[in-house]
Amino acid sequence: MIGVNDNKMYSNLLVFKFKNYELEYPDSIKEILSFSTNSGEFKELENINTLGKTEYKKIFIVGLGTTEEFNSVKLFKALGNAIKSIKDAVSDLDILDNLNEDFGYTIAQSLYLSQYKYKGIKQEDKKVKLQHINLISNYKESISKGLIIGNSINFARDLANMPSNHVTPKYLANQCENIAKEDNLDIKILDKYTLEQLGMGGILSVSKGSIRSPRLIVMQYFGNPEDKNVTALIGKGVTFDSGGISLKPSKGMEKMISDMEGAAAVIAVIKAIGKLKPKKNIIVLIPTVENMPSGTAYKPGDVITSYSGKTIEVISTDAEGRLILCDSITYAKELGATTIIDVATLTGACANFLGGINIGLSSNSDELSEQLINIGNSIGENFWRLPNNPEYMEQLKTNNADIKNTGNNSGAIVAGLFLQSFAEDTAFAHLDIAGSSGFTSPTEGYDVGANGYPARTLIEYLLA
Ligand code: BES
Ligand code: ZN
Ligand code: ZN
């Protein structure tokens, strides 16, 4: 689908253009380009019909802005935007990568992510028209790495976009088993019985209303066994969040099929890591459940015992994410994690106040926060760190248990601090992707639906 220097005959060509700098083009297309009206403005796209003057029928010119302002985020967006416009117009495309510097890694990711469109579950399998892309480039190695990442993220976007009668906890576990098999990763799937033996009251309680039994999926990749540093990534895998007995309003409830986007993101990461094989130690944990109301469901007022031993009074059964995550955090610590990062569509509050532009970051570590924020900025995923004042924790005090699962206000901040209290002194970051994990209209090259955030940031963090 996306190749490098494959020497086939393609009908269409895409080239880049700077505003203030002349790139080198082959003679055969130089003349056509002299007719271009593209000023090289960032994201400017021109489509030239060559009228038989070259081997190509059409040449697309993509503006990259000025060389001073140019960086890989600009390239990612400009190319993504162009592919979004082209992907249903032509079926093949050569791309001339003559940027004088190795941007192959970014180009490959941008191509994969912008070419993606969720197909839905339909009788007719309707693919996007653009099926064959070839990069003409000197940077084959970085392109292949970028393709691995793009492919892994698109795989996860499909999981996130698919409905919850297809993507069940069992289905997620099966998908992870396939990934583990492909790249020889260690995998353990803790089933309901095992969770009961261990006393994972958070995961078990949330799953009680559903006929679909819970799982805790644990995948391990130890690329440097001598190193004592181990990063655990935890992804919220609620395959459907009805709210449970604290039932959500019916309007918009269908969106809660994507309450496993945290799980999808960490699946993308481990799928890529299994192939890129960095010298790092990584554990991926996915607590996965369906949150349903029923006669067997957990209820507001219940006091549950988490895996840590801490008791939790359930005020809202809709604040279920933190209950499955806290058990996973404790388990990650037991497995020897020295850094723990969770990814979760955790609070509507986060979606509302950050407006989908930033991922909410709650952390007990300045260093880890800074690393994630900087990497995010360099690739185009934005993070906004939430406050950590201990006063917020007052809201979670109760006479009935050690802690309760919701406060009165400041929803995203309180949720972050709830999770931090389980991480204790282990370096910890909670990434609230509610609102930022998908687009409701096409944005910067991404189609509607899940965008895979923050998988790219996490992959860079692990490769660094
Ligand atoms: N999955 C939701 C959060 C969510 C809301 C994600 C909107 C994406 C879009 C989460 O489980 C939830 O219901 N949170 C509650 C917490 C509240 C009860 C403290 C919320 O945000 O309303
Ligand atoms: Zn939820
Ligand atoms: Zn909920």
Image: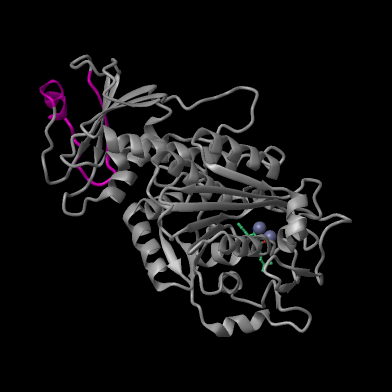
Is residue 42 found left or right of 387 in the rendered image?
Answer: left
Residue nearest the viewer, comparing 82 with 154: 154
* Quadrant that contains the N terminus: top left
Residue 323 in view in this figure: yes
> What residue lies at 48% left-to-right and 66% top-to-bottom?
361
Q: Quadrant of residue 446?
A: top left
On the question of residue 451 being in view, the answer is no
Which of these two is toward me, 214 or 393?
A: 214
| Image coordinates for residue 29, horizontal then vertical, percent | 15, 23
Q: Quadrant of the C terminus?
A: bottom left
Q: Measuring 16% from the left and 29% from the top, which residue is drawn there?
A: 33
| Image quadrant, ligand 1 | bottom right
Horizontally, residue 86 falls left or right of residue 317, namely left
Please tell me which residue lies in front, 13 or 421: 421
From the viewer's perspective, is 411 left or right of 195?
A: left
Above or below, 221 relative to 377: above
Q: Position of residue 79 (x, y in %)?
A: 32, 39
- Please, which colouring scheme is shown? one colour
Relative to 223, is 336 above or below?
Answer: below
- Residue 164 image position (x, y, % from top left): 69, 43
> Residue at (41%, 30%) from the top-left corner?
87
Q: Is residue 27 magenta?
A: yes
Image quarter for residue 64?
Answer: top left
In the rendered image, the residue lying farthest to the right is 295
Start-end of magenta stretch: 26-50
Residue 171 drawn above or below residue 123: below
Is 178 situated above or below 232?
above
Q: How many marks?
A: 0
Residue 210 within the segment the image draws in magenta: no
Q: Position of residue 161 (x, y in %)?
A: 59, 41
